Structure formats: structure tokens, C-alpha cells
Amino acid sequence: MAYAAGYEVRSFRLRRVEVPVLPRGMRPLRVLQVSDIHLVSGQNKKRRWLQSLAALRPDFVVNTGDNLSDPEAVPELLDALGPLMEFPGTYVFGSNDYYAPRLRNPGRYLVERFTGRHGANGNEPARNVPRNPWEDVRDGFDAAGWVGLSNTRGRLKLDDGTEIALTGLDDPHIKRDRYDEVAGGPEEDADLALAVVHAPYLRVLNAFTADRYPLILAGHTHGGQLCVPFYGALVTNCDLDTDRVKGLSTHHAGGHESYLHVSAGCGTNRFTPVRFACPPEATLLTLVPREA
């Protein structure tokens, strides 16, 4: 446990993934995904590591939510992401952007997941729980030109004129997703369509895939957070299967297939600051043309 709390939780990694989703003849795009930062005031190593990711010079950045684990950490969060906000970007929020974390018995959490009593379709919005200053995070992101995607559509236009059509949902984990407000599939006049959500619940993945989005980006799972070596994750904190708890996979629905990338994220709830066999990460996705 000392290793999980003292070393691995601060052993930040960059994963690199190639995804064949672009039209033939289009140049590759470098997309940096950051997720589940769960920043607590004073986490200076994490803050410096996030700042250093700007050296990758991505074409654009996707933030898949749960930025906070401390209501006092907003200035440090915006400082940590400041160099990345020099690039085009987009974001969705997760439950811990809205609500402060609560102290829970991790054993109870595992029991609920294994017995199916955790709420496979998500949880109701929290009541009588302190709120995080998510509006300040939103205002900071918006001031940098990042596109918010809470149950809405948006666009990113890159320096070379490439246009990315974006569709995003608010967090399904607390049932804030409203797919009917964005249904209808990708906008066909863009160079690429991208779907973004915090928690990869199956109802959301099914809807995006049936609407023919080529790539869905999500976070939330922490990659299982406490994993068993040579076996993998025990839980996903949603109804996604553990085989797809992190990394690149495919999803099938409505006779169609989408790529799904789930980030294991780079933080933890402040009350469970441990990781085991699942180091914190960000991902640089290189989008390349489809072979056919």
C-alpha cells in the first residue's frame, strides 16, 4: 500500500495511441487527452507534469472531466492547464467538477460494484453535498477559447483550416446526459466528427455509435485504479466491461462500429490517493487515415 500511495500515484506517464479514423488523404492529427485530474491544492508535481505536456504541441486538446478534488484548487488547475490552453481545445465535466468528494469506505464501494447495487445506469445528482466552483473552471476554459460540450455541439477550427465537429454530453454518472438534445449524427461538412463524454456508460456509447461517430473519447474509470497484476481491473465505476476499462477498443451498436478511447486519468479522489498496477496517465492519440 505504501508503494501505491507513495510512488505509483505520482508516477505520471504518457501513452501513445494510433487511431485510423480520418478520411483518406488527410494529414494525421495529434490529439492530447487529459482526464480525471482531481487536483488538490499543493499537488505541485502533477501541476508541473501537466504543464510539461504542452511540449508535445498537439493539434488540439480534449479534457474529459473531473478536474477537481478540492474547491480551493481552481487557480492551480488553471495554472496547470495554462500552457495547454494555448492550443485549441474542448471539454466536458464530470461529477467531481460539480460536487466535492466525500469520504467513503473503499471496501463498501467494491462490495456495491460486485453485487450490482452501485447503480449500473448512474447515480442521482448528489444532495446535501458541498459543491465545487465549477463555474470558475468553465469561465477559465471558455476564456482560453476551449469549447464546452455539455449536451451540445461545437466546432474546432485548426490553424491549417481543418474543422472538427464536436458533440458532447454532460456526465452520465449523475444522469446529466441529454442525448436527445444532440441526436442526429455527425455534421457532414466537417473533416472529422468526434464524440466526447466523461463517463462511458453503455447507453451513451450505444447512442453515439448508432449515430455513426467514428471516435468516442471518455474518462471516469481511473483504469480501475487498484488493479491486479497480470489480471487487470476489478471495477469500472460504470456499466462498461472491465476489458475496456482503459485504452483503445471498439464499440458496436445499431449495426455500426466506433472506436472508443477511455483514459485512465492522472488523479484520484482526494480520500483514496492510491493507484496500483494502473499509473496515472495522459494520452497522445495520433489520428490517421482509414485504410479503406
Image: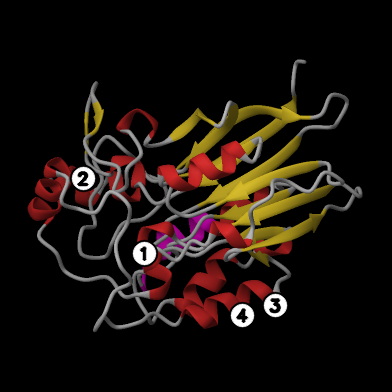
Q: For mark 1, what is the residue?
A: 174
Q: Label 4, label 3: how many angstroms apart (C-alpha)?
A: 6 Å
* In front: label 4 or label 2: 4
Kind of residue sitting beneath label 2? Ala
Displayed quadrant of residue 277: top left
Residue 247 is a magenta residue: no
Q: Can residue 284 be seen in this view?
A: no
Q: Do the residues labelled 4 and 3 touch (CB within 8 Å)?
A: yes
Mark carried by residue 136 = none
How many numbered marks does the figure carry? 4
Q: Position of residue 284 (x, y in %)?
A: 60, 39
Query: Residue at point 57% right, 31% down?
Result: 259
- The crowd level at tag 2 (other Cα within 10 Å; few <14, some 14-19, many 20+) is some
Q: For mark 3, what is the residue?
A: 143
Tell me which segment is drawn in magenta: 41-50
Kind of residue sitting beneath label 1? Ile
